[in-house]
Image: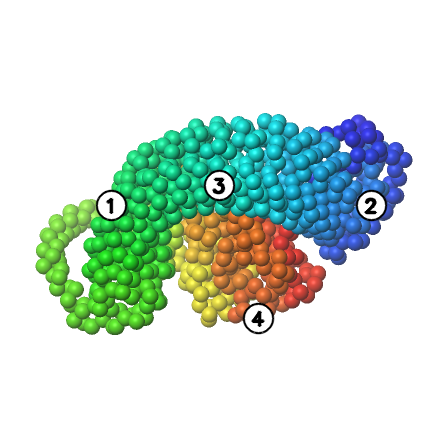
Amino acid sequence: MRLSPYINAITITVFASSLVPAYFGAQASNGTVKGEEAHALLEWKSGLDNYSQALLSSWQGDDPCIWRGIGCDDPGSVSELNLTNMGLQGSLSKLNFTALSNVISLNLSANSLYGPIPPSVGNLSNSNNLSSSIPEEVGTLRHLKELYLGENSLNGSIPRSIGKLVNLSELTLHYNHLSGFIPDEMNNLRFLRCIHIGDNKLIGRLPDNVCLGGLLENFTAPNNHFNGHIPKSLKNCSSLKRIRLEGNQLTGNLTEDLGAYPNLKYIDLSYNRFYGELSSNWGRSANFTSVRISSNNISGEIHPMIWNMAQLRVLDLSSNYITGWLPRELRRLTYLLELDLHDNKISGNIAPEIGHLSTLEKLNLGSNKFGGSIPQQLGQCRSLWNLNLSNNEIQASIPSEIGNLQFLRDLDLSFNFLAGKIPRSIGKLTTLEVLNLSYNSISGFIPQSFNDLLGLVSVNISHNDLEGPIPNIEAFRDAPYSAVAGNKAGLCGVAAGLKKCSERTRSKKGNKFIILIIFSQLSFIILTSLLIGVIFLACQRGKRTEQDSLEARVPGDAFAIWSYDGKMVYENIIKATEGFDSKYYVGEGGYGVVYKAKLFVNQVFAVKKIHAPQDNETLGLMSLEREATALANIRHRNIVKLYGYCFHPRDSFLVYEFMERGSLRRALGDNEMAMEFDWAKRASAIKGVADALCYMHHDCSPPWIHRDITRNNVLLDGDYEARVSDSGTARLLKSDSSNWTSLVGTVGYIAPELAYSTVVTEKCDVYSFEVVALEVIMGRYPGDPISSSRQSSTLSMQMDSGTLLQDMLDRRLSLPLDKDAENVVSSAKLALACLRVDPHRRPTMQKACQVLSIQVPLVKPFSDVRLSELDGVQWLR
């Protein structure tokens, strides 16, 4: 069908990462000559870099209709340019759009275009790094429905002509450098459903009639300089589903300025100047999943209706002036993942009903006026990984039930009136990384079980009444004196400022428990004798059958998948590790502690002792066996091989191949290993992790999401080849629970979208992979790669300042040369592409593997490559 010469009759829609049409609003010439079109395109090609010109090698001659990425209409005139994902680099300044008057679809997304937007184009993909300002000519796109210009380097103000886009339903301008006021003409856009103008430098008031059409669903304007009140049109905007206004200077009484929003799910008003109280309107919004109003001037009590928001996942009212107490009604929030009320004036006891919040992962009640004791029921919140009750008036002793919080990483009970002894059960918290018990009245000895806290990084027990030896683990040995000061003179051990422990000190501690130990040992001997007799009879009956079955299934091999009656294997592992003694400790993953075990004629294996799951979180034996069998069937050279499993009422563990060089964390933390871990090996390691994730995401059916890619879960063999461990262990442990919609992972590696969404996708793994890739290149943890505001990101500031890539590299190695330099640049480009805040704009692992498999020559010396040139490279999907 012949196209109309008047293309202003076509309705144009722009999609975020695929179709990016441009509307020209001018009559197409019927006499367009192919030669003119070919000349215009070839002229533009000549202005691109050499590598880009090579990608367009088919662009020769005078018939553009046969060129790559070019589409023509029936008369043979160029009507479509689709060069998405080509890796092109250059500007649009040489592209003469006047000669391409019949083009109705232009897609240049996922490239590395830069420079000003030509006025004749009016719209390009947010996937490039466009600078300059938005041209007034954008107003000629009268039929435009969706405009995406986010995540570029656009400056200047929003043009008034944008008010002419009366059919616009979505406007995305976030993550730019736009300044000035929002033009009043935006009030003309009555069909708007989504507005994204966050992370700019906009000032003034929000648009008065932003919801005049009554269709607005998503309004995000965080991290600008807006002031004044929330406009009335927003107060009455019942269609709203999501509001983000954090990081501005907005003011007003929330009771008066906000209405009832029956469809609202997410609201963030943090870091503003709002005051007033939380009215009953909040409880009428039954669909709320996230409420964040931290760092304002909110006062009064939390309205009882708040506790009726049964779908709530996040409630953050921290750093306000809220009073009252925590009522029993909080037990209704059974889906709550995060409760942050720190830095308020809330008093009373912590309600025991908090134990009903079984999905809670973060609880911060610090800096309030809570009294009473820590409720024992808190130990029922078994998903907690962050617990902060510091700076309160809590008394009594620490309940032993705290030891049930098996995923806890950060525990802060400092600045209270806690007394009594430290419960031994805290030694069971093997995932604990930060422990602060300072400024209390805790007495007695530090439990021996603390020697099992091998993952502990930071500890503070100062200003208590503790005595005796400190645990002989790294966190205590490396602790500064301020972390142990202010205790009894009898506190001793290998730490700064403490005296060494004498044998008398050790025996003194032992004498206090000698009677208890004698009685407990007698009881243990009697019970053990009976138990051994029963087990011996059972093992003699089943041992031969078990061994014959094992040999029949795996001829010539030591063992394979073990069933639940594998008593012989179970006992051998217990014996080889001496009951999982700490001297066999190798490391720790997200789901258990790893030990080294020699089995079957000195064959060495890694045995991961799984953190004991709770009864209500486990599957039946049949389901567990199916999951473990599926995990064992995963075969990939870059995934640690699972040889077998054993599930036992006392100890459950998985048996893997042993990686002699340990974790990536160990390799980067040891100077000698780091220097041996040269650039070629590091590039290979990054590629290996990418291959493993690609296999899990794209070759397994159903796909497996790892959810905890970290330096601890990347292991290295003798040749520094990377292997991913813990592959699918989350699924193995909780495959029938809400685990796929709960926060799992390691802080610092968790994708930013999980701060407001509970849906875990493959793109969460992609983000974690990026952090690990940067860590390999830099030789150290890169810090928080992105935050809620790109401007506050350390890495983003380095890119904005024109930092050279070589300045980011691990200084223990000399600068990479030749192919190594090319690999480092490719890895850095890929890592930065994975940094995208929007998970949909991150590449798939399949695409990442393709990129790492291609050797791309450098267009400039490695020493001249800047981070800013790599950021925004959008040739990935």
Q: Which residue is label 2 attached to?
A: 96
Q: Which of marks 1 and 4 is nearer the N terminus?
A: 1
Q: Which residue is label 3 attached to?
A: 274
Q: Which of marks 3 and 1 is nearer the N terminus?
A: 3
Mark 3 and mark 4: Cα distance apart in space? 53 Å
Task: Return the x and y of residue 813 as percentages of the image width and height.
Answer: 54, 69
Q: Which is closer to the viewer, label 2 or label 3?
A: 3
Q: In this view, does 715 lie to the left or right of 785?
A: left
Residue type at mark 3? Answer: Phe
Q: Which residue is label 4 attached to?
A: 814
Mark 3 and mark 1: Cα distance apart in space? 32 Å
Q: Which residue is label 1 attached to?
A: 372
Q: Is residue 419 left or right of residue 818?
A: left
Q: How many labels does the image show?
A: 4
Most foreground residue, 392 or 738: 392
Q: In this view, does 79 lie to the left or right of 733?
A: right
Mark 2 and mark 3: Cα distance apart in space? 51 Å
Residue 832 visible (yes or no) = yes
Residue 585: image quadrant is: bottom left
Q: Earlier in the sequence, mark 1 or mark 2?
A: 2
Mark 1 and mark 4: Cα distance apart in space? 59 Å
Task: Return the x and y of residue 420 as percentages of the image width and height.
Answer: 20, 54
Q: Which of marks 3 and 4 is nearer the N terminus?
A: 3
Residue drawn at the location 22% of the way across and 50% of the way down: 396
Most foreground residue, 212 or 100: 212
Task: Return the x and y of residue 179 as percentages of the image width and height.
Answer: 65, 47
Residue 79: image quadrant is: top right
Mark 2 and mark 4: Cα distance apart in space? 46 Å
Is the residue under label 2 in contact with that under label 1 (CB below 8 Å)? no
Q: Earlier in the sequence, mark 2 or mark 4?
A: 2
Residue type at mark 4? Answer: Ser
